[in-house]
Structure formats: C-alpha cells, structure tokens
Image (tube, rainbow, N blue to C red):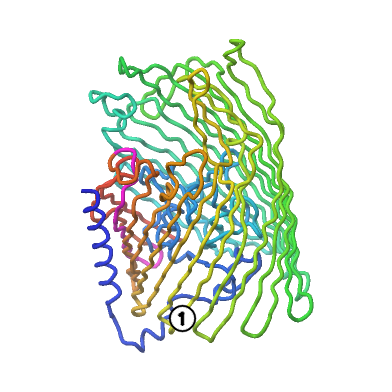
Amino acid sequence: MKKKREQKSVALALVVGLALSSLNFTSVAAEEEAQVFDLDQVVVTATKTEKKVKDVPAAVEVITREQLDRRNIKRVSDALTAISGVFVKSNKGMMGTTDSITMRGFGNQKQILILLDGQPVNDGYNGSVDIANVPLETIERIEVIKGPGSALYGSNAMGGVINIITKDKAKQETILRAGIGEQGTENKSIYTSGSAGKWEYFLSAQKTSLDGYITSDEYKRALVGSDKAQNPGKNGLDREQYNGKLVYHPDDKSKFSLSSGNNKYSYFYENATDRGKRDADSWAFNYENKMTDTSSLKLSYGEQKIDSWYVSTSYSSKTNNVSSYTYSQTPSKTTQAELQYNFKSGDKDSLTVGYARRTEHSDSFGKTLTAASNGRNLTLTTANSDSNIGGKTETDSFYIQDERKLSDKTTLYLGGRYDDWRFYNGYTYGYDSATKSYKTNNTAEGKADSFNPKIGLVHKVNNKLTLRSSIGKAFRAPNVYELAKDWESSTGAIYKCNPDLQPEEATNYEVGLDYQANKSLLAKLNLFHTDVTDAIDKKTYTNVAGRTVYQYINSGKAKVNGLEIGLTKRLSQAWSSFLNYTYTDAQVTESSTAPENVDKQMANVPKNMFNVGFDYTQDRWQGSLIGSYLSETNSPSKQGQTGYGTYESYFIVNTKISYKMTKDTMLSLSVDNLLDREYYSYYVAPSRTTYLELTHKF
C-alpha cells in the first residue's frame, strides 16, 4: 500500500510537470522580451560582498519580494519549499512552531545557519530557529546559499546559509493586512515605512491566532497505550510580532542602522494541559562605509534573548490518568560582533578580511508541578525544582578571502576561516540518587579549534554558459544542550553530559553550471559529494543498575551524494513556470551508537524531491500554483512504515490567486493541499485549508 501510494504521487508529479512544461501561451518573440531570471541580480551572502549571481562560486537561489507577494506564502518556511535541495519539515500545518529547514543531506536545523540581515539567529541552547517569527512584510528578499559556508560564516553552516534580508530603502507607504481562514485562523498586520531627511524608518506589527486542527486520534493513544483514550482536541496558537528598523545616512558613502524586534508565541492543546511559549527579543547595530572606490568597512553587533517554556503531561499506562506534569524553561542569550574590511590589491585581487566574536549562554530548568488548563489559559499551582543545566560557549574567528581574476572569463576564490571555540561555566543541578538529595555539579571545560578553507572557480564559457566548482570544509561546534544535559528523568532514564565533545566536520566537493539559453529559459545543474566525520549523535546504553543512559558523543562518519536540476521558463509576459528535482543519497558509513543504521538513508533527508509550478501576473490578476513531491524521511528503524509517528511520502499542490480591486486594495485566496491528500508528517497532515486575505496600501 505504501509503495503504491508513493508511485501514484511520483506519477502525478511527473504528469503535472510535463503538462506545465509543454504549455505555450505566446509567440517566441514575446518570450524573448521577458526575462525569466536575473543572473545579474546582486547578492551579498555568498561572498560577504556585493556580487552578481552569475559571478559567485556557489549554488545560489533568491526569493524576491514579488514572489513573496504572489505565491502562497504565509511564513518564511513556505517560501523555501519550492527550492531544490531544501527540505522544510512542518508537523502542524499553519502553526509553524515545529518548522525546521534542512538541506544538502544534513538532516538537522542546527547544521544550517540562518541569518537575519547577516546576524545569526540560531538558538544558543540547541541551534534551532523559529523562522516563523520573522514577519513577511519586512522582508526584501531571501538569499539561499547551498553547500558549506564555514569558510566565511563558521559553525552551523555545514549544509548551507540562508540570509533573510529586510527592507532598507524606504517608501512612503503603509500596508494593512487582514486575513481569515480555516482552522480558526485570524491574522492582522500593519507595516509602515518612510523617510525624513537623512533618516529612514521601518515599523511593523502583526498578530496571528488559530485554533488548529485535530492532529490524530492516535496522538493520545500513543502516549498512554490505550484505545479508549479521549482525543486531546485541536492544537492552537497565538503569535505577536513587533519589529522596527531605523537607518541614518550621514553621506552618500556610509550608513548606520539600528533594528529591534520582539516576537513571541504560545501554543496549546484544546483539551489538555500540554502547552508552551517562546519569547524572543533581539536588536542589532550595523555600520557600513564605502571608504574609497576600492575599499569598504562593515561593523556589526547583535544580541538575541530567547525564553521558552513548555508543560508536558505524563500518563499512567495502568490507570490511563495523568500521573504528573513537567514544566521546562530554557532561557538563552547569544551575541555576535563582527568587523569586516574589503579592499583591492592591484588590478587582479579583491580581498575580504574579518574578525568575529560570538557568545552563547543558556540554562534549562525542569520542574514537576500541578497544573490545570482551560482552553488557552494555564494555572500552575505548585512547583519543585528537579533539574537545572547550563553553560556558556564563546568563539573567536578570523577569516580571509581572495577573489583573483585569472582572466576575463575565469575568477578564482580562495579563502578560509579559523575558529577558536570553548565551553565553560557548565553546571548541572539535580537529584543525586546516591546522596538522595539535590546538588549542583560543575562540569569540565571543553575547547577546540577548527580551520575551514575553501577554493572556488567560476568560468564563463560564453555569454550563455557559466561553470562553477569548489572544494571546502565545514564544521559545527557542539551546543549547550549536547554538552551539559545531565539529569535523571521521572521515568528513571539518565542523561549524561559530555564536555569533551568535539565539533563535527565535513568536506564538500561540488561542480555546477548555469545555462541561460535565452532571456526566457534558464537551466541549472549541481553535483555534490560530502564526507562527514566526528558526527555528533546520541548514544544509548544500559548501566550496571539496569537503567537507560543517554549521552551525546562523536559517533561516526557519513557520506552524501547529491544532484540538483532546475529549469525555469518564461512562457509569456504573463506566465512563467519552473521545474526542479533533487536526488540526495545520504548514508551513515560508520556508527558506534547505531551500527544497524550503517548504509541506510539518514533520517530527515528525503532521497527524492520534485517541485513544479507556474506564476501568473497580468492586469488586475496574479497568482501561482505549485506542486511538491517528497519521498519519506523516516529514521532508518522506521523506513517503510506509515501512520502516526512517521514521515510519509506525498505530493501536494498549493495555490494562491489575487485580484486587485482598486489601485491600492487587493483580495487574495490561498488554498493549501488543494488535492486534499492524506499523509502523516509525524502527526496527520492538515487537509485542504483555505485562507482569505485583504490588503490595503496608502
């Protein structure tokens, strides 16, 4: 049954793709007039300098402001689903609280670096990111750099770098949005920008709420092991976002910018106590100065504070009643300061040098308590400390990159980054079974250094064909969660810290090409191979007392072989279409924690992904239709399984159509899962869901 459903999904995806690719809406002459994709578009993430897409030694995708408005995109993760090589895992539909982004065979969010205007936003506790907390209205574009980026960006950038770039050229405008939809969804937002003399400002506020949907009758049965358990009800969300940016231009060559934001959400189960909250505060300062025609300076500093908590319910397998509630809170703080200097040396060399310092401080508190809930409200009546863990990491980094013109057609990029990392002030506080009391233990310090070089070559064969190749290393330093987690759970399991963890490392080899056949047709091809060593994984064993013990260790090796093919075609002035396919063979080659997984596809890495779609814009109408196929992403032990707790293969279609009622007012209708496909993404995925939105500008 599973195999038949997967075959049907593949067949449907191919049929839709072939149908779209065969469409012809206008004459060839009209096609020639419409540019399908601007390879001359300037990006800043690939080289940390302003370069055209066609000139950088990496596979780059850009999501434009126009695409954000035209396509069915309600949060940042929606914008990434149609990009080759990028996998968006979403377990609860429009809630977005569990969204994670992985790419290039790396199946964990902590192995992908997410930036907001160049500032890392990965959580200092476990490397996770809540990108749904970035309001869409403030975004100018999203730059996706596929492949290792540690030579410029350091830790976390093993599979790639995603830079969310907000607007910095103000228009005198105010935009109001109001939307309603199924699952009890309500959304209201306001965005305003403008200028006064040398000052520019950007302000936004957004409030979203939804009641959610019933994830599955199996949810609670899986927790308590009883077919008689009642369903916990829908799982809902309340989210608020407030963001602002102020830009000052003292002259034509320099600018200062100061940005700040508060983004928070709370989620809940309608008929259960389980719920959580995440509150993030951030601010950043940036200074840029184009000192001369051949040199420039950048200085930045940013802070991010995150406080998250959740209450989970434990059930008795014998009585089917609640046995206890567990309250967990995790505050964290990250800071990053960076100084970058760009200059030309002679006629052939352009150099970038920089220094960065990043600190991460996090704690985690666990308590057993009595709790009661009523819809969105929660009452905590008693609490006792059970376990605390925490610690700090800091990294000092130096990087250099040389862009050397070998000829008019060939450019060599050569660079590397040195990171000096250490973990300190680690501690655990919990129940000691030997002394039968709570106590604090200091953990040992950990330290490591890593040098990650990269060499890239860009060769323009002619005005249509550009070739790229690169070899580079990448690494990810262990986080506080992996280093310091040390406690005994109420079930008797033991979690042991490991301050001796070393960074996991990868070496990547890649070749690619862009072929611009004409102004209306663009083809892309990327081939890559990655070797991973010292992979960090959870070891599970039984101690002499017969209790289960968990500990993170450097467990083994893996290899990834991948292929990405993309085709974008302008069909007419009004219509454009795209196709892309990704094949990723990611296997564990050595493992001391799970030798049974060797030579099997890694969890959270789909072997096959396929996207097809088209966009339409003409007169008062605009819209998009995008179909996406994804093979299963189960862990090796669950591969081939279906139902609750698994990640099944699927092919879904999402669409959006908008009508401009007046010059400043637009009405939009979005439909998720248009074909109403049934599949599990751990929980059952949402059925067909509609959303109606009204936008007014003045």
Instruction: Give yes or no for residue 660 being in the magenta stretch.
Output: yes
Residue at 31% of width from left, 29% of height from top?
222
How many numbered marks are there?
Answer: 1
Classify residue 642 by image quadrant: top left
Query: Residue farthest to the bottom?
Result: 29
Instruction: Give yes or no for residue 688 being in the magenta stretch.
Output: no
Classify residue 312 by image quadrant: top left
In front here: 341 or 407? 407
Q: Amino acid at mark 1?
A: Gln
In front here: 601 or 346? 601
In x, y percent, where is residue 382? 50, 14
In x, y percent, where is residue 648? 31, 48
Q: Relative to 309, say whether 449 is above or below.
A: below
> Is residue 162 in view from this perspective?
no
Residue that label 1 marks: 516
Q: Relative to 309, say whether 70 is above or below.
A: below
> Is residue 46 in view from this perspective?
yes
Which stretch appears magenta?
644-665
In x, y percent, where is residue 130? 50, 45
Q: Relative to 519, say whether 334 is above or below.
A: above
**Does 71 sit left or right of 111 as displayed?**
left
In front here: 583 or 676? 583
Q: Residues within 10 Å of mark 1 (few under 14, many from 20)?
A: some
Residue at 68% of width from left, 64% of height from top?
197
Q: Secondary structure at mark 1?
A: strand
Query: Residue farthest to the top?
Result: 436
In front here: 106 or 256? 106
In x, y percent, where is residue 369? 48, 17
**Does 276 sit left or right of 296 as displayed?**
left
**Does 401 sit left or right of 328 as displayed?**
right
Classify residue 363 by image quadrant: top right
